[in-house]
């Protein structure tokens, strides 16, 4: 009872000390929030203020290459010119991700797409927030890179959570001309030449601490692209509002196997561009009533967008796939019931695997880590292992969708599938 009385007293005292907040007060809150984010980033990336990636141990590397660990070590013993890994124990070796990719090439594992074949664009989408779009985008990209893909992540959300997850402070370390904004403004903006416009988006691509995983970052200024596209729609005769992003990404398809778009939780010109640029859609959907109810509106709006595309395009817009990934799934009866309903009404579209709501993900969040980046885990490793297993299951299924789409596109383009590589008998 005394504790409750003290809490009430504290609330009364707090309410008495509060004062009205003007624009300067809100600006001060923004400065303090930015300083807090910087403190968290610097703490998580000490001492260089940049993220670094852990090493991959032998059994992990063998799994990524489709080998038994004994087979991997025998091959390395026969080929001392290949990366041998750093270790004090020859039976426990650690490899950088770049070395894993070198081994993949040395063992002649198949390329992810055929020569001359453009990469795929995947939009992670849902017009509702809090549905794990950014978490899915980051983890899926890292999973694909570990399995030999070259991936580009594009942060299209002005909140820039994906950018921050890669250890970059969006509002102090990313300029507006380093995001998609300048490109979307066009070569002439507001009646004047745009000095920051480039012919495509290549100049703003940044490397990350993950080998073969690049990023186009975001910041708050990306929100201004909405007004820029609206102005171009008003001022430029024949301007197709949905096309700029696809045109900017088109040359980059030659550089990457997969381009992943992390979209904002809104219906916007930016998301319309993402929908048009995409070859496939991955809709993240938690099994909760409020999220399920909003999904109907989402599908209605996407259908309307596609009809708008088709009115001006020579060919109708068709996605290679539009799949639903259940996210933030908990072991609760209501989640189980809603999951059952979703699978009943979307039997072909819903992924068999789900992304679980894990305490492991929450635990590593303050360190700006994904599950795939964890080296030392302060908790039960079994919890981490179960979370990673669930991630791998979901991402492996999505990789299958991407691979099938790449094969389908290659066949339509008249490209032939390469002969399968025969793995050594000791694999």
Image (spheres, rainbow, N blue to C red):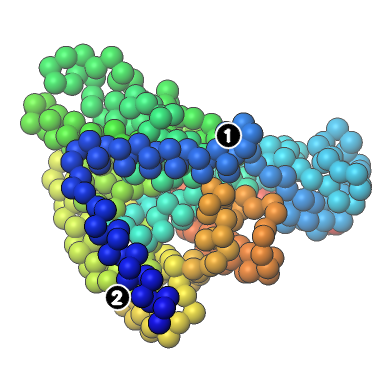
Q: Left or right? Give the position of 1 relative to 52.
A: left
Residue 61 at least partly seen: yes
**Relative vertical location of residue 94 with respect to residue 82 in this rendering, above or below:** below
Q: On the rendered structure, is 155 left or right of 354?
A: left
Residue receiving disc 1? 50
Residue at 50% across / 69% down in the picture? 356
> What residue do we see at 64% from left, 53% from top?
374
Rendered image quadrant of residue 131: bottom left
How packed mark 1 is, by other alpha carbons closer than 10 Å (few <14, some 14-19, many 20 or more), is some
Image x and y of residue 414, in percent: 45, 42
User: Which residue is found at the position 44% from the left and 67% from the top?
Assistant: 328
Locate the C terminus by quadrant.
bottom right
Sequence-first tag of 1 and 2: 1
Q: Is residue 93 left or right of residue 30?
A: right
Q: Tell me the distance, in whole angstroms, between the alpha carbons under discs 1 and 2.
A: 40 Å
Circle 1 — which element?
loop
State the residue at coordinates (62%, 45%): 148
Q: Give above or below for 400 relative to 107.
A: below
Quadrant of the rendered structure where residue 260 is?
Answer: top left
Residue at label 2?
289
Is residue 104 shown to the viewer in this render?
Answer: no
- Where residue 128 sits in the image (x, y, percent)? 28, 59
Q: Quadrant of residue 13?
A: bottom left
For the N terminus, give its image quadrant: bottom left
Q: Can you tell which mark lies on residue 405?
A: none
Secondary element under disc 2, as helix, strand or loop, is: helix
> Residue 160 appears at what percent x and percent y?
38, 42
Q: Position of residue 255 (x, y in %)?
A: 50, 32
Which residue is at the front of the view, 299 or 119? 299
């Amino acid at each position: 009872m005394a504790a409750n009385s003290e809490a009430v007293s504290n609330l009364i005292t707090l309410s008495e000390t509060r004062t009205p907040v003007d624009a300067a007060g809100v600006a001060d809150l923004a400065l303090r929030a930015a300083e807090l984010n910087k403190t968290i980033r610097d703490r998580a990336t000490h001492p260089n203020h940049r993220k670094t990636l852990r090493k991959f141990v032998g059994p992990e590397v063998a799994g990524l290459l489709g080998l038994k660990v004994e087979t991997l070590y025998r091959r390395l013993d026969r080929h001392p010119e290949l990366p041998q890994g750093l270790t004090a124990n020859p039976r426990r070796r650690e490899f950088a991700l770049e070395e894993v990719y070198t081994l993949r090439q040395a063992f002649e594992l198949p390329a992810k797409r055929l020569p001359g074949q453009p990469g795929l664009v995947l939009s992670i989408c849902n017009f509702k927030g809090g549905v794990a779009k950014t978490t899915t985008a980051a983890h899926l990209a890292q999973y694909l890179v570990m399995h030999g893909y070259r991936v580009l992540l594009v942060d299209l959300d002005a909140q820039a959570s994906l950018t921050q997850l890669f250890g970059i402070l969006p509002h102090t370390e990313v300029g507006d001309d380093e995001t998609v904004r300048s490109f979307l403004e066009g070569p002439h903006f507001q009646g004047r030449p745009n000095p920051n416009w480039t012919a495509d988006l290549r100049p703003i691509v940044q490397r990350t601490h993950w080998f073969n995983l690049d990023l186009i970052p975001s910041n708050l200024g990306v929100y201004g692209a909405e007004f820029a596209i609206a102005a171009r729609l008003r001022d430029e005769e024949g301007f197709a509002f949905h096309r700029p992003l696809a045109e900017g990404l088109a040359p980059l398809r030659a550089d990457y196997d997969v381009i992943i778009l992390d979209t904002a939780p809104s219906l916007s010109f930016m998301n319309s561009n993402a929908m048009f640029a995409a070859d496939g859609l991955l809709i993240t959907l938690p099994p909760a009533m409020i999220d399920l109810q909003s999904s109907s509106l989402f599908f209605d709006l996407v259908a309307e967008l596609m009809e708008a595309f088709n009115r001006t395009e020579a060919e109708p817009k068709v996605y290679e796939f539009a799949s639903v990934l259940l996210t933030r799934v908990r072991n609760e009866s209501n989640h189980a019931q809603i999951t059952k309903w979703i699978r009943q009404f979307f039997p072909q579209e819903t992924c068999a695997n789900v992304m679980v709501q894990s305490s492991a993900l929450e635990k590593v969040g303050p360190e700006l880590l994904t599950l795939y980046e964890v080296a030392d885990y302060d908790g039960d490793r079994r919890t981490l292992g179960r979370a990673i297993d669930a991630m791998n299951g979901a991402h492996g299924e999505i990789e299958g969708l991407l691979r099938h789409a790449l094969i389908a596109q290659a066949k339509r383009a008249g490209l032939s599938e390469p002969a399968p590589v025969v793995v050594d008998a000791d694999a």
